Amino acid sequence: MPQIDDAKLKELVLATKSIPKDKLSQAEELAHKLSIPLRDALVQKEITDDISLGTLEAGFYKLPFVSLLDIEIPDEVLFSLPEEVARRNKVVLFSRSDAEVKLATSEPSPQLDYLVRNLEKKTGKKVVLHYLTPRELDSALYTYKKTCNIELLVVIGILAVLLAIVLVAINPDRQFKQANDTQRKSDVNAILNAISQYMADNKGDVTNLGIPTGTAEVVNSTNSADLCTALVPTYIAALPVDPTGGSGTAVIVCSGEGVTWNTALHCGSKHSW
């Protein structure tokens, strides 16, 4: 079946006298200037409208005309024809009843006859082919993407809710604090083991460590013990640092550039030394 090109459309318009010749000439000039189809130029200059041209074209193809502007196609009807088949054949399934199935296309072709026969064989129903404008066909085919996008947004929304529930259950901040506390306990044990070895080598004398003897004292930020010089590297390879403080690198040089390393225990918080 021949397609309606600019020459055929002009012939139809002149034959039906639906558009004045001077208006038709203006549309032809615009189409040539913008390199667009005559059909688009007629609509763009508002000489006629998309539906009027569609009715004229449907008459040429001897097909019933349909406009889908006011028809909402149910998803179960639309998706009964796969998107790949719909796009390849430039056709949309817009209605389905117990007696018949309705298809619409803007480009009738022998290829569609094959599709119609297959649908009739598969459904056992009569397939009625309609004509709709190219613009409305593009809009109908976009409905496939639009529906898929909505479904995708729903899935993303569900995943976001599930992620929020998982985050609340896991509580990452609590997990990080527990991990840091575990590291602190390990580091403190390493220091205590180093002190024990030092004491064993020095017959219990901890004077050089600066640890108070006799009356018990609280070791704090102002009353601290200098462990680094006495312990590193003989008893411990490096003095660890708090996981949330400093550069995170263990101290292996006890002094330099006037800097000394002291350790202090703050009894008021379990998350610091």
Image (cartoon, rainbow, N blue to C red):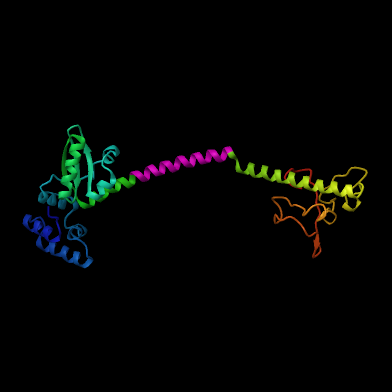
Asked if residue 66 can be seen in this view, the reply is: no
Which residue is farthest bottom? 33
Majority secondary structure in the magenta region: helix
In the rendered view, does 214 fall on the left or right side of 81?
Answer: right
> Would residue 164 be counted in the magenta stretch?
yes
The residue positioned farthest toward the left in the image shown:
15
- Region in magenta: 147-169
In the rendered image, which quarter is residue 42 located in? bottom left
User: Residue 228, image x and y in percent?
Assistant: 82, 55
Q: Residue furthest top?
A: 98
The residue sitting at 81% across, 64% down in the picture is 258
Percent across and percent down for residue 196 are 85, 46
Q: Which of the two residues, 163 or 82, is positioned nearer the viewer here?
A: 82
Answer with left or right where residue 36 lies relative to residue 147.
Answer: left
Q: Nearer the viewer, residue 126 or 172?
A: 126
Asked if residue 165 can be seen in this view, the reply is yes
> What residue sits 17% from the left and 35% below the top?
125
Please give the count of numbered marks on the rendered protein. 0
Q: Give the residue drawn at x 60%, y 43%.
A: 172
Q: Where residue 111 sits in the image (x, y, percent)?
A: 17, 49
Q: Say which residue appears at 19% left-offset and 66% top-offset.
A: 32
Asked if 161 appears above or below 247 in the picture, the reply is: above
Task: Note whether 49 is above or below 33 in the view shown.
Answer: above
Q: Position of residue 108 (x, y in %)?
A: 16, 50
- Examine the structure image and report whether residue 36 is included in the region drawn in magenta: no
